[in-house]
Amino acid sequence: MDTLVLNKNFFAIQITNWKRALSLLYLGHAAAVDEEYRLYDFESWREVADSMTKCAHGAIITPNFSIPIPDVISLRLYSKLPPMTIKFTRRNIYEHYDFRCCYCGTRFSSDQLNLEHIIPRSRGGKSDWENVVTACIECNTRKANRLPHEAGMALRIKPSKPGWRGPDSLLMRSGIKIRASWQRFIDTCYWDGELKI
């Protein structure tokens, strides 16, 4: 069970597990945020639990009380923004290229893709966003330890470094499902849309 973490200005900065979320709430470092943007400390959130007939995302039940796992929490003091760069990880590379082979353009499952150095490491190629792309096993084997033009191949998808996309960048990990309660904090239209006041 995951919880969306906001800074004190309600900007989405992280996704954490329910244990960490409840710990932050209990220690007074965060407040639970409901659908109407009301903030609750641990005690008031626990009291609200008594009026909830069913918590959609589960609750922790103790001998003395039960407390719902919050979907969204807001940190009380932290106002910084997350780093404006995307980490160079296998998962983020696969996501960036939409699980497609950059040589043939076909989409594959992650177990049928490899990371491919355009300039092979044995020839001085670096492991960075500008030199690493995704390739299917067949294309990667065909290219081998050569430059693309030496193998008679061309990149259909050019290498690029992904840009920061605001809160959407938090979800550049497979398997995270966006909850309806998170959407208003993550949707870039919410943050970037022109206001009519």
Image: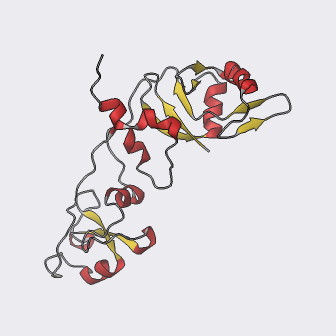
Relative depth, front residue between 100 and 22: 100
Q: Residue at point 27% right, 83% down? A: 142
Q: Is 105 on the left or on the right of 71, as rendered?
A: left
Q: Residue at point 44% right, 33% down? A: 184
**Looking at the image, is 69 positioned above or below residue 118?**
above
**Residue found at the far front of this picture:** 196
Q: Is 87 on the left or on the right of 53, as rendered?
A: left
**Looking at the image, is 164 positioned above or below residue 74?**
below
**Looking at the image, is 165 positioned above or below residue 42?**
below
Whole-percent x and y of residue 5?
51, 33
Whole-percent x and y of residue 101?
30, 70
Q: Residue at point 52% right, 42% down? A: 179
Q: Is 193 on the left or on the right of 184, as rendered?
A: left
Whole-percent x and y of residue 130?
22, 58
Which quarter shows the N terminus?
top right
Q: Is 191 on the left or on the right of 182, as rendered?
A: left
Relative depth, front residue between 17 and 175: 175
**Residue found at the far right of this picture:** 63
The answer to which quarter of the image holds residue 119 is bottom left
Q: Residue at point 32% right, 38% down? A: 84
